[in-house]
Amino acid sequence: MNSNTICACACGCAEKLSLKEKFKNDFKIGASIPGALFMEEQKDQIELLTSQFNLVTPENLMKWDSIQKVEGEYHFEVADRFMDFAEKHNLEVHGHTLIWHAQTPEWVFKNPDGSLPPRKQALKRMEAHIHTVMGRYKGRIAVWDVVNEAFKNEGELRKSVWFEMIGEDYLEHAHRFAREADPNALLCLNDYDTFLPKKCDKLIETATELKKKGLVDAIGLQDHLQLKTPSLEDYERTLAACSATGLKVMITELDVSFKPFKWKYFGNDEEKIEFSPEEIVLLHSYQAEKRVPPELDAEFSQRYADLFHLYRKYSESIYSVGFWCLSDKTSWLNSNPIKDNYPLLFDRELKPKNAYYRIMKEV
């Protein structure tokens, strides 16, 4: 594939187009990548990334358990190579993530005797990690997801282990440590299912309070969406409300799943998952086609076109639109709990889908 010669009409003409060029006056266009892409020099994926995108997120390689599995032992080899790769290709970096209740080593949350670390000790661990990681890349990473997924869908602060150890103000401490570590980095509060009204309200309330203290610059909307959920009206309500805060809005983990979300079954084999009769019919059609069923392709393309119309409408507030993964080939939705999905603009062969052309022609 030569991704530098993608034509908006899919006719093979030589007009050069890219997402980053189309939206260069609106917002950054990003994608998350795994370490294998640059460690193994996967040239076809590198070509797609560098031709279409101008922002990149480390998918897992900067999370706590990738950098500091053992207390005080930091391993930056892969992260350093990621930074060198991004800078070589003039890609802005969106750092992900400093504080999260998942993908964090057990020692952070437990003392050797199994007890919960006291507040003072937990704060020291948090401060040391944030200062060390952010300090290493100070001035090189433009944006950081400081606290990830801090809220429950019901509109409450998640009672994570961070909450149990430190208390409700753990978010403020995390952002204060981050501001100290790199005063010029944009600090983002990132979460999913933000189209739910109560969750959106709590996210905005917290972000606004932290903004008043100079500790938050942006709200991150993960946007792991489905074909019909949320409705466009509910989705725009969230965009409008976040834009009204005066904070930057970052679309951080965009994809559109064809298959039903079954996260309560995470960690189980697919055959143990309960499906409705309608879902079974749909899943069988995927298995037969080995791709998105043609009858749903138009709906998928329309969904992406509608989303990008909204992003452009709120472009004064939106800093970046970042996809979670580069193509269907590497999408996280290909794995647990349901195998194989087709949620992105580029297919398993890294070719643009009709949804890509719809965006390029109509938005």
Image (cartoon, rainbow, N blue to C red):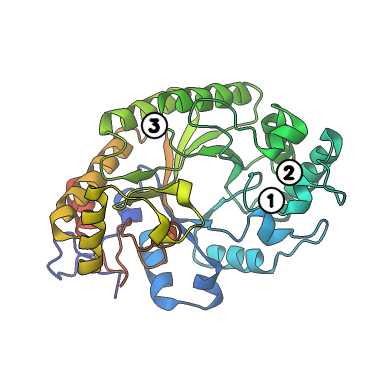
Dots 1 and 3: beta carbons under 8 Å? no
Return the mark for residue 175. none
Residue beneath the point at 82% across and 47% down: 114
Q: Which of the two discs, 2 and 1, labels the residue nearer the N terminus?
A: 1
| CA gap, disc 2 and disc 3 | 32 Å
How far across and how far down the image is residue 188, in percent?
Answer: 56, 38
Dots 2 and 1: beta carbons under 8 Å? yes
Specify whether 299 is left or right of 211.
Answer: left
Residue type at numbered disc 2: Ala
| Residue 228, quarter of the rendered image | top left
Q: Which of the two discs, 2 and 3, labels the residue nearer the N terminus?
A: 2
Specify whether 150 is left or right of 132.
Answer: left
How far across and how far down the image is residue 224, in percent?
Answer: 40, 46
**284 vs 225, nearest the viewer:** 284
Q: Residues within 10 Å of mark 3 (few under 14, many from 20)?
A: many
Camera-side mark, 1 or 3: 3
Q: Residues within 10 Å of mark 1 (few under 14, many from 20)?
A: some
**76 vs 225, nearest the viewer:** 225
Camera-side mark, 2 or 3: 3
Return the mark for residue 138. 1
Return the mark for residue 181. 2
Residue beneath the point at 53% across and 34% down: 218
Residue type at numbered disc 3: Phe
- Residue annotated with mark 3: 195
| CA gap, disc 2 and disc 1 | 7 Å
Residue beneath the point at 54% across and 63% down: 86
Dots 2 and 3: beta carbons under 8 Å? no
The answer to whether residue 132 shows anywhere in this view is no
Element carrying mark 3:
loop
